[in-house]
Image (cartoon, rainbow, N blue to C red):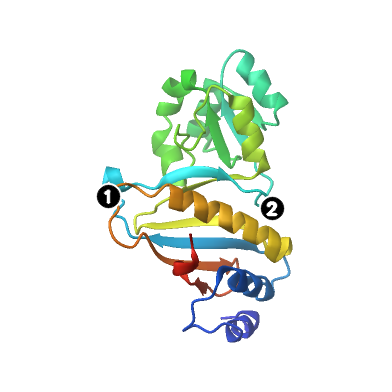
Amino acid sequence: MGKKYIDSAKLIDKSKAYDPSEALALVCETSKAKFDETIEIHIRLGVDSRHADQQVRGAVVLPNGTGKSVKVLVFAKGDNVQKALDAGADYAGGAEYADKIVQENWFDFDVVIASPDMMGVIGKLGKVLGPKGLMPSPKAGTVTPDVARAVTEAKAGKIEYRLDKTNIIHCPIGKASFGVEKLSENFNTLVGAVIKAKPAAAKGQYIKSCVIASTMGPGIKINQTKLG
């Protein structure tokens, strides 16, 4: 543990679960790195991701973005290619990009969007895009006939949330430089979306725990009873 981490950890009561606004103020205070640290949220849910009817997955546009510039690749054909580029896509095209990914191990992008008529091309990339969390899906709004809108949303700070194998959602909610007010707006938007996505099959306590942390800082527990 570095000196800055130890100093930051002293400010946090490990036995306490903080109110969200208190926790966000603390996470900004404990972000002491020389770069603008990303603030991440980790939500453990009382569901079992092994069951199809207990999956929690979706996407939401954070009101203040993530503070990160996002590179977008769009799989489309015809007029949609130019529409995607006009909307700000970094790359747009068809099979040539699929070949580049497979043959050159090319991954110079953060988000993949596809029009429905490109799923034949995209389907072959499941094994390489899936493990990296880059596979487009209708549920996340990344498979859509309106590719221009999807590009605009991705550039504006749309993030995807999904359960990992341990039933935890990990998501960025902005940068330390955003300050408490903007981080709170992003935090509330994301948590609200996760609560709204509660599966009907989920029984008992839905949000088991919630922790926020900066890139280099210690985790801060949030009182989950104060979440929605």
**Nearest to the observer: residue 91 or residue 200:** 200
Q: Is residue 131 left or right of residue 61?
A: left
Q: Which secondary structure, mark 1?
A: loop
**Nearest to the observer: residue 107 or residue 142:** 142
The x, y position of residue 137, in whole percent, is: 45, 34
Asked which quadrant contains residue 209, the reply is bottom left
Q: Is residue 127 left or right of residue 48?
A: right
The x, y position of residue 142, in whole percent, is: 52, 33
Quarter of the rendering occupied by the N terminus: bottom right
Residue 176 visible in the snapshot: no
Q: Which secondary structure, mark 2?
A: loop
Amino acid type indicated by mark 2:
Gly
Identify the residue at horizontal 54%, vertical 21% (top origin).
Answer: 145
**Nearest to the observer: residue 208 or residue 173:** 208
The x, y position of residue 87, in whole percent, is: 70, 28
Choose the circle earlier in sequence order: 1 or 2. 1
Label 1 belongs to which residue? Answer: 50
Count of marks overlaid on the render = 2
Label 2 belongs to which residue? Answer: 67
Identify the residue at horizontal 53%, vertical 61% (top origin).
Answer: 41
Identify the residue at horizontal 66%, vertical 31% (top origin).
Answer: 89
CA distance separating discs 1 and 2: 33 Å
Asked if labels 2 and 1 touch by Cβ distance under 8 angstroms, the answer is: no
Give the numbered dot on residue 159: none
The x, y position of residue 163, in whole percent, is: 40, 52
Seen in the picture, residue 92 relative to 184 is either above or below; the reply is above
Amino acid type indicated by mark 1:
Arg
